[in-house]
Amino acid sequence: MCGIFGSTRKLDNQALTSVMDLLDHRGPDSQGHELLASSASEHPIIFAHTRLAIQDLSASGHQPMTSNNRRWWITFNGEIYNHFELRSKLTNNFRGSSDTETLLEYIATFGIEKTLSEINGMYALAVFDAQENMIYLARDPFGIKPVYFCLEQDELTFSSEVKPIFASGLHRLQSLNQNALGDFLHLRYVPSPNTLLKGINRLRPGHLLSYDLTNKQSIQRPFVKSSFSKFSGTFSEAVDAYRNELSNAVQQQLISDVPVGVLLSAGIDSAVIAALAREHSSDITSHTVGFGSQHQECEISDAAETANILGIRHEATTVDPTTLIDSLADIVNSVEEPLGTTSIMPMWYLTQLAKKSATVVLSGQGNDEPWGGYRRYQIELLLQQLPFLKSSIFKKADKLSALFKSDPIKRGLRCLGYKDDANRFGNAYALFTPGELELLGVGNEQPNTSIDYWLNLLANSETIEPTERMMRIDSRMNLADDLLLYSDKVAMRYALEVRVPMLDPNVVQLVESFPLDFKTNLRRTKLVHRAMSRNFLPKAIIERPKKGFQVPFGQWCKTTWRDYMEANLLSPNLKINSSLNSDGIKMIWHQHLTGSFDYSRQLFALLTLSLWMETYLSSHKHTELA
């Protein structure tokens, strides 16, 4: 795991030094940059890299790296888990054992497109083809590793993070993308390729950007292809197939020349990952964060019980609301984008704990989406079983949502009356109601463009049921630009690599091939997954109520956090007031205080938006973002 940067623009030494300093936390083991000559450019292309050494700790893994034939250069962030298998297909004389060298030589032998179709890993990579004067930028199929890019005056600049792009001299782009604000308030994140910063884009998962230095033209296209294959075996055979595939994924992702740990919650997903890791390695430590036993959201005791049953070392840390207040501005600054996900706060402290004894950790993240583990999938399943609820006569039923305090019920009612998937899914995702968006002074148009894009790319087949379509979208859009995004940014702030075996492409392809009733129904979720876990875990762990890495934020808003919230949401001189109606924010705040409705999710999104605006939109000097 590393930091990458590149630009076709000419940078002076001071700007390049600033870029490298801003990426240093992602790769504290070494730094490097190369000025690459191109016959199509008057000045050299810059490729830069900061390294967190994971495989092959020697200098032979140093980047940027060139191929043996000197045609190709690479700056690469991530891990290629099947690189030994790929290396066996090559006849090169290798300098070392790093996956970067394997990846580069595979590209040199077979080309970028074939390589992307065969590698198994998480990555954001850039390669320069000196013969064809082409730069290629790619992001892994599930977007585990983010990469940002800017095309200004037809020049390309890219980076693992946003701040280095500004540090390279593109200060004037540091302004709000007003068109993306509605998406954020609707989804609690902004789906790729957009961000809230004008001129800054995030490459979509499973996509390749090709930039031609000769004509300064760029093309973005997907390299992921949807699979419509259907598993034809029995439920029991599905359990066995899933166990083998997931076990192989965990075994591959344990490959490392540095210590590996596990992020362990109270839930079944991380427990299964820990159990499989324990099968393949005796040297595993688990790590948990919580808020103290007085909070029902605290997972420490449950996780400790799981670790004890599995026979692995366990470490835990406790955080309190005051500590989180002191850290939130730093967290938002590190994530670089506002997110309405309270779990970014405990993740900040969990990664600090894990870093004390590990450089790599396995996580159970990414399992709910392919398996249908959220309530919205069961609501969608109900709508399919009762198709009359999609009749237009039910569209006004969403007004009934005001009578309910349960957020899933409110969103479920807003789905009624919509036959088309994009509108129905958009209402299922909605953070704010149309009326609340009007109060805030923004349009209530749904983010259907992004939803439709993924529907057409991955689920455009009558053989895939609507519930499965939603699961496929969430596995590529929601995960990549929300949960996986903050996991990368928060963990890499402390140079910790997070791996997600549940999102191994072979695992997900198998899961998506299972019949829907092998995955979820109206009463239970993750059916094959739960059945498989009985091989490792007692029933008490499998049947634990889902806590979902939650934070008692709604309660804290009314007590410990109240002054902080009012200072950062209601003060008249805040930047957020220039984009949102302050009276609407006040109304939502007071309704939460009075208990009319639990607006904790909405308020956290507004809070991170406000903090982000104060940091990222207040100045054009990148030094203030360091």
Image (cartoon, rainbow, N blue to C red):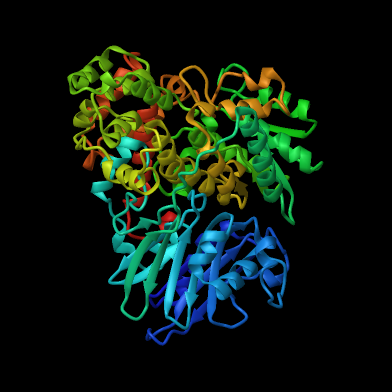
Measuring from the top left, give residue 124's x and y in whole percent. Answer: 51, 59
Residue in the picture at 50% in, 60% down: 22
Residue in the picture at 30% in, 68% down: 152
Whether residue 333 is situated above or below residue 155 in the rendered picture: above
Whether residue 421 is situated above or below residue 507 in the rendered picture: above
Measuring from the top left, give residue 595's x and y in whole percent. Answer: 35, 13
Measuring from the top left, give residue 246's x and y in whole percent. Answer: 65, 41
Whether residue 35 is situated above or below residue 284 in the rendered picture: below
Could you tell me how many numbered marks the image carries?
0
Q: Is residue 599 visible?
A: no
Measuring from the top left, give residue 387's x and y in whole percent. Answer: 30, 21
- Extreme residue in the front direction: 232
> In front: 561, or 9?
9
Residue in the picture at 70% in, 36% down: 274
- Quarter placement of the N terminus: bottom right
> In front: 324, or 207?
207
Whether residue 223 is situated above or below residue 435 in the rendered picture: below
> In front: 15, or 521?
521
Q: Is residue 147 left or right of residue 120?
A: left
Q: Is residue 459 left or right of residue 585?
A: right
State which quadrant residue 462 falls in.
top left
Q: Is residue 225 left or right of residue 545?
A: left
Q: Is residue 595 visible?
A: yes
